Image (cartoon, helix red, strand yellow):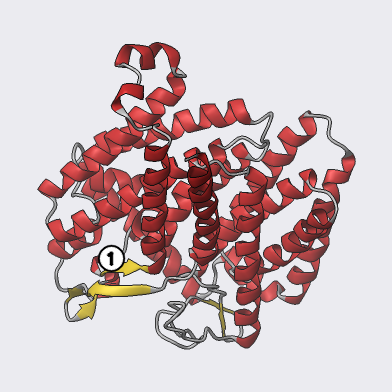
């Protein structure tokens, strides 16, 4: 029996690593195409991702493993009294808050305008929560997970660098990649003496790729300080390539989140009186940044100053979205408009616009408040706060934990993909779980 359980756990770990490498690639079977005003409604389109199927296999194997070792027998579960007095109160409140968020999100289907879309997004949220708890319970070494995480980021960075220099993203249905060129309508570009295509990697937008690489960069720097031999060389090489990939996304929020995350990491790492040699990556990153900025100063200037027509339009759209979210919050302060229904509510309020005019607000917290009301936002903030307390406690053994959390927080303030896109949702809950994992 023990050999059988051990075999399942080893297979589970291997499949999880495969899932982690494939996560950035949006291979999907479209189940239903959302349509508004004769245009494709991205946030109403529903499908089944390849990595969702793979994750279902992970869930099944985990349940089998738990059942075989008897850990899910009712007789083994503690009473409520025992749980309250024996379990860490912070962890208990964290669990209660996250499950309340899940239940409230499910209830929001009732008052949503488009209940089918609300149900779809609720299922995606539940998949994200399942990932969070499974990663916390997986008997896997943090360093091995980090190694695969960095390897995944390295693959995406190499792909991103190639895309920027070729100024194109080649379509591939097996990897879920759509074609992008600098002059395509809707392509993410930087305007400077023409249009320059930003790197997508395998993701659906450069901003998601940037957020993913920001966390990968922090992970690679952290593991470099802990590694030896060939792994130390691997992590040093990886952080250079990942930094270049991050640069070519030209994602301001991602670059800021990586910068802040690294500052926080080094603050806690150096408090432990670690050798000055841990600052070797900093020197390498400074040199790389100077080289890239000198070559692409005009693109950096365009993104920082926001003086071009394209950047002005982007800023104006974001400000408009903030005002729209405030209107929704004021009129639906308690319950929100329902999970996944933000853009559909905008359509109901003004049904004569082009479909691309209905966009989510670029702020995770405003999105949650708009869709789930103050009740949903409060439960999420409680959850986030207690994760912060646990991460602060774990910072001695894992100085990268608060760096991960800070990076996620900054990304949450400037974008919505942690709430509106499958890859972003899974990346968010995966990183939160790694934040709570102790370094072995």
Residue furthest front as drawn: 1
Q: Quadrant of the C terminus?
A: top right
Q: Position of residue 375 (x, y in %)?
A: 25, 34
Q: Which element type, helix, strand or loop, lies under badge 1?
A: helix
Q: Position of residue 418 (x, y in %)?
A: 41, 53
Decide which of 325, 244 is in the foreground and name it.
244
Decide which of 310, 121 is in the foreground and name it.
121
Circle 1: is it few (<14), some (14-19), or many (20+) Cα within 10 Å?
Answer: many
Decide which of 147, 398 is in the foreground and name it.
147
Q: Report whether 176 appears left or right of 111.
A: right
Do we see residue 386 in this rendering?
yes
Q: Report whether 293 appears left or right of 385.
A: right
Q: Report whether 379 appears left or right of 195.
A: left
- Pointer 1: what residue? 43
Do we see residue 409 in this rendering?
no
337 vs 275: above or below: below
Decide which of 149, 375 is in the foreground and name it.
149
Q: Residue at x 31, y 48 (%)?
A: 126
Q: Residue at x 44, y 25 (%)?
A: 91
Name the image quarter holding residue 140. top right
Q: Position of residue 270 (x, y in %)?
A: 79, 34
Q: Residue at x 26, y 53 (%)?
A: 123
277 vs 297: above or below: above
Name the image quarter holding residue 376. top left
439 vs 146: above or below: above
């Amino acid at each position: 029996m023990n050999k059988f359980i051990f075999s399942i756990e080893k297979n589970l770990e291997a499949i999880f690593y495969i899932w982690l490498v494939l996560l950035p690639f949006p291979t999907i079977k479209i189940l239903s195409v959302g349509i508004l005003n004769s245009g494709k409604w991205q946030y109403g389109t529903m499908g089944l991702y390849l990595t969702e199927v793979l994750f279902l296999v992970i869930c099944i194997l985990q349940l089998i493993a738990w059942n075989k070792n008897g850990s899910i027998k009712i007789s083994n579960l503690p009473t409520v009294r025992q749980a309250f007095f024996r379990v860490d109160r912070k962890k208990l409140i964290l669990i209660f808050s996250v499950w309340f968020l899940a239940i409230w999100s499910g209830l929001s289907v009732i008052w949503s305008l488009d209940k089918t879309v609300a149900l779809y997004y609720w299922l995606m949220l539940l998949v994200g929560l399942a990932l969070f708890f499974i990663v916390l319970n997986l008997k896997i070494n943090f360093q091995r997970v980090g190694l695969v995480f960095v390897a995944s980021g390295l693959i995406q960075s190499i792909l991103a660098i190639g895309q920027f220099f070729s100024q194109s993203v080649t379509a591939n249905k097996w990897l879920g990649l759509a074609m992008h060129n600098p002059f395509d309508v809707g392509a993410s570009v930087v305007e400077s003496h023409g249009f320059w295509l930003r790197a997508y990697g395998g993701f659906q937008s450069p901003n998601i790729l940037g957020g993913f690489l920001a966390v990968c960069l922090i992970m690679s720097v952290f593991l470099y300080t802990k590694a030896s031999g060939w792994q130390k060389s691997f992590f040093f090489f990886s952080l250079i390539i990942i930094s270049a990939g991050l640069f070519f996304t030209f994602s301001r929020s991602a670059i800021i989140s990586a910068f802040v995350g690294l500052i926080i990491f080094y603050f806690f790492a150096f408090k432990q009186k670690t050798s000055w040699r841990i600052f070797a990556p900093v020197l390498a990153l400074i040199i790389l940044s100077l080289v890239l900025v000198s070559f692409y100063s005009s693109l950096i200037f365009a993104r920082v100053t926001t003086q071009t027509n394209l950047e002005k339009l982007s800023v104006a759209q974001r400000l408009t979205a903030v005002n729209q979210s405030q209107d929704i919050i004021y009129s639906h302060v308690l319950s929100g408009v329902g999970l996944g229904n933000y853009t559909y509510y905008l359509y109901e309020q003004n049904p004569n616009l082009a479909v691309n005019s209905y966009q989510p607000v670029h702020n995770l917290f405003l999105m949650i408040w708009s869709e789930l009301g103050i009740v949903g936002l409060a439960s999420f903030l409680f959850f986030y706060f207690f994760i912060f307390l646990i991460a602060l406690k774990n910072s001695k053994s894992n100085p990268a934990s608060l760096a991960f959390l800070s990076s996620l927080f900054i990304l949450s303030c400037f974008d919505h993909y942690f709430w509106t896109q499958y890859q972003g949702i899974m990346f968010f809950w995966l990183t939160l779980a790694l934040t709570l994992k102790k370094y072995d």
